[in-house]
Amino acid sequence: MPKRYIVRLDEQEQQYLKALVSTGKAAAYKIKHANILLNIDINGAAWTDEQSASAFNCHRNTVANLRQRLVEQGLDAALERKPSKTPSRQPVCDGEAEAKLIALRCGEPPVGRARWTLRLLADKAVELEIVPSISHETVRQVLSKRN
Protein backbone atom coordinates (compact mmCIF):
# COMPACT_ATOMS: atom_id res chain seq x y z
CA MET A 1 0.00 0.00 0.00
CA PRO A 2 1.56 3.33 -1.00
CA LYS A 3 2.18 5.93 1.70
CA ARG A 4 -0.40 8.65 1.91
CA TYR A 5 1.88 11.14 3.64
CA ILE A 6 5.33 11.46 2.11
CA VAL A 7 8.02 13.15 4.22
CA ARG A 8 10.24 15.46 2.17
CA LEU A 9 12.53 17.57 4.29
CA ASP A 10 14.39 20.45 2.69
CA GLU A 11 18.04 21.15 3.49
CA GLN A 12 17.22 23.72 6.17
CA GLU A 13 14.84 21.36 8.00
CA GLN A 14 17.40 18.55 7.85
CA GLN A 15 20.08 20.82 9.32
CA TYR A 16 17.72 21.91 12.10
CA LEU A 17 16.83 18.32 12.98
CA LYS A 18 20.46 17.17 12.88
CA ALA A 19 21.45 20.04 15.18
CA LEU A 20 18.61 19.14 17.54
CA VAL A 21 19.74 15.52 17.67
CA SER A 22 23.46 16.22 17.98
CA THR A 23 23.23 18.79 20.80
CA GLY A 24 20.98 16.57 22.92
CA LYS A 25 19.65 19.56 24.87
CA ALA A 26 15.98 19.05 23.95
CA ALA A 27 13.43 16.78 25.57
CA ALA A 28 13.89 13.08 24.87
CA TYR A 29 10.66 12.82 22.88
CA LYS A 30 11.73 15.71 20.63
CA ILE A 31 15.06 14.06 19.91
CA LYS A 32 13.27 10.79 19.19
CA HIS A 33 10.82 12.52 16.83
CA ALA A 34 13.69 14.30 15.09
CA ASN A 35 15.55 11.01 14.60
CA ILE A 36 12.43 9.35 13.21
CA LEU A 37 11.80 12.24 10.81
CA LEU A 38 15.38 12.18 9.57
CA ASN A 39 15.16 8.45 8.88
CA ILE A 40 11.75 8.39 7.18
CA ASP A 41 12.65 11.34 4.94
CA ILE A 42 12.32 10.30 1.28
CA ASN A 43 15.43 12.40 0.47
CA GLY A 44 17.41 10.75 3.26
CA ALA A 45 17.45 7.17 4.54
CA ALA A 46 13.84 6.54 3.39
CA TRP A 47 13.15 3.93 6.06
CA THR A 48 9.76 2.27 6.28
CA ASP A 49 7.53 2.90 9.28
CA GLU A 50 8.26 -0.61 10.57
CA GLN A 51 12.05 -0.14 10.32
CA SER A 52 11.90 3.20 12.09
CA ALA A 53 9.55 1.90 14.78
CA SER A 54 11.79 -1.03 15.61
CA ALA A 55 14.93 1.13 15.57
CA PHE A 56 13.45 3.70 17.99
CA ASN A 57 11.39 1.31 20.15
CA CYS A 58 7.96 2.71 19.37
CA HIS A 59 4.81 1.53 17.62
CA ARG A 60 4.56 1.92 13.86
CA ASN A 61 1.41 4.00 14.40
CA THR A 62 3.57 6.51 16.24
CA VAL A 63 5.72 6.85 13.15
CA ALA A 64 2.66 7.07 10.89
CA ASN A 65 1.07 9.74 13.11
CA LEU A 66 4.33 11.68 13.16
CA ARG A 67 4.49 11.49 9.37
CA GLN A 68 0.90 12.76 9.10
CA ARG A 69 1.45 15.63 11.55
CA LEU A 70 4.55 16.77 9.65
CA VAL A 71 2.72 16.85 6.33
CA GLU A 72 -0.49 18.44 7.63
CA GLN A 73 0.74 20.80 10.37
CA GLY A 74 4.46 21.36 9.82
CA LEU A 75 7.76 20.61 11.49
CA ASP A 76 7.04 22.30 14.83
CA ALA A 77 3.83 20.32 15.33
CA ALA A 78 5.63 17.09 14.46
CA LEU A 79 8.33 17.68 17.04
CA GLU A 80 5.87 18.46 19.82
CA ARG A 81 3.61 16.00 21.57
CA LYS A 82 0.08 15.73 20.31
CA PRO A 83 -2.02 18.10 22.44
CA SER A 84 -4.72 16.53 24.60
CA LYS A 85 -8.28 17.27 23.52
CA THR A 86 -9.55 17.19 27.10
CA PRO A 87 -7.66 17.85 30.31
CA SER A 88 -6.70 14.79 32.34
CA ARG A 89 -8.81 16.04 35.25
CA GLN A 90 -11.77 18.35 35.29
CA PRO A 91 -11.42 21.31 37.68
CA VAL A 92 -13.08 20.87 41.08
CA CYS A 93 -14.21 24.48 41.36
CA ASP A 94 -15.82 26.48 38.61
CA GLY A 95 -16.25 30.24 38.81
CA GLU A 96 -19.54 30.04 40.71
CA ALA A 97 -18.15 27.66 43.33
CA GLU A 98 -15.07 29.86 43.72
CA ALA A 99 -17.26 32.92 44.30
CA LYS A 100 -19.30 31.08 46.94
CA LEU A 101 -16.13 29.85 48.64
CA ILE A 102 -14.69 33.38 48.74
CA ALA A 103 -17.98 34.74 50.10
CA LEU A 104 -17.93 32.04 52.77
CA ARG A 105 -14.37 33.00 53.70
CA CYS A 106 -15.32 36.67 54.00
CA GLY A 107 -18.25 35.83 56.29
CA GLU A 108 -18.27 35.17 60.01
CA PRO A 109 -16.28 32.15 61.18
CA PRO A 110 -18.09 29.33 63.01
CA VAL A 111 -19.01 29.77 66.64
CA GLY A 112 -16.03 29.22 68.92
CA ARG A 113 -13.49 30.04 66.19
CA ALA A 114 -11.56 33.25 65.71
CA ARG A 115 -11.11 32.74 61.96
CA TRP A 116 -11.67 30.30 59.12
CA THR A 117 -9.08 27.60 58.56
CA LEU A 118 -8.63 25.91 55.21
CA ARG A 119 -9.94 22.61 56.57
CA LEU A 120 -13.00 24.32 58.08
CA LEU A 121 -13.70 26.03 54.75
CA ALA A 122 -13.37 22.73 52.88
CA ASP A 123 -15.72 20.94 55.27
CA LYS A 124 -18.28 23.78 55.17
CA ALA A 125 -18.19 23.93 51.34
CA VAL A 126 -19.05 20.22 51.18
CA GLU A 127 -21.69 20.62 53.92
CA LEU A 128 -23.37 23.49 52.03
CA GLU A 129 -23.13 21.44 48.80
CA ILE A 130 -21.08 24.09 47.02
CA VAL A 131 -18.90 21.26 45.71
CA PRO A 132 -19.26 17.46 46.06
CA SER A 133 -15.79 17.16 47.62
CA ILE A 134 -12.79 19.43 48.02
CA SER A 135 -9.46 19.31 49.80
CA HIS A 136 -8.00 22.04 51.96
CA GLU A 137 -5.19 22.43 49.39
CA THR A 138 -7.70 23.23 46.64
CA VAL A 139 -9.32 25.79 48.94
CA ARG A 140 -5.88 27.35 49.48
CA GLN A 141 -5.28 27.56 45.74
CA VAL A 142 -8.67 29.17 45.12
CA LEU A 143 -8.14 31.74 47.84
CA SER A 144 -4.53 32.49 46.95
CA LYS A 145 -5.33 33.50 43.39
CA ARG A 146 -7.87 36.00 44.69
CA ASN A 147 -5.80 37.54 47.53
Image (spheres, rainbow, N blue to C red):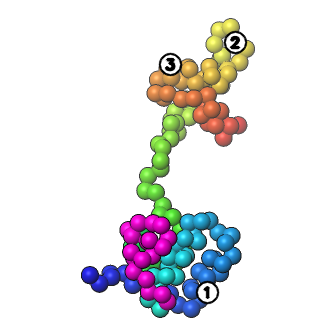
Which disc number belongs to residue 37? none
Judge from the rendering whether residue 27 lies leftward or rightward of residue 67; answer left or right. right
When the figure is inspected, residue 94 is found, relative to residue 46, above or below; the finding is: above
Q: Which element carries disc 3, helix, strand or loop? A: helix
The amino acid on which the numbered mark 2 sits, given as a three-letter code, is: Arg
x and y, in percent, of residue 32 in the image: 55, 71
Magenta-drawn stretch contains 49: yes
The amino acid on which the numbered mark 1 sits, given as a three-letter code, is: Gln
Q: Dot 1 corresponds to which residue?
A: 15
From mark 3 to mark 2, how far is it between C-alphas?
18 Å
The amino acid on which the numbered mark 3 sits, given as a three-letter code, is: Glu
Magenta-highlighted residues: 44-61
- Dot 2 or dot 1: first in sequence order is 1
Tag 3 near tag 2, CB within 8 Å:
no
Q: Residue furthest right?
A: 114
x and y, in percent, of residue 62 in the image: 42, 68
x and y, in percent, of residue 77 in the image: 50, 72
**Which quarter of the image is occupied by the C terminus?**
top right
- Report if residue 72 is visible in the image: no
Q: Dot 3 corresponds to which residue?
A: 127
Can you tell which quarter of the image residue 72 is in?
Answer: bottom left
Neighbour tally class for label 3: few under 14, some 14-19, many 20 plus, Cα within 10 Å:
few
Q: Residue at x 56, y 66 (%)?
A: 29
- Dot 3 or dot 2: first in sequence order is 2
Which disc number belongs to residue 113? 2
Q: Residue at x 63, y 13 (%)?
A: 110
Neighbour tally class for label 1: few under 14, some 14-19, many 20 plus, Cα within 10 Å:
few
- Report if residue 13 is visible in the image: yes
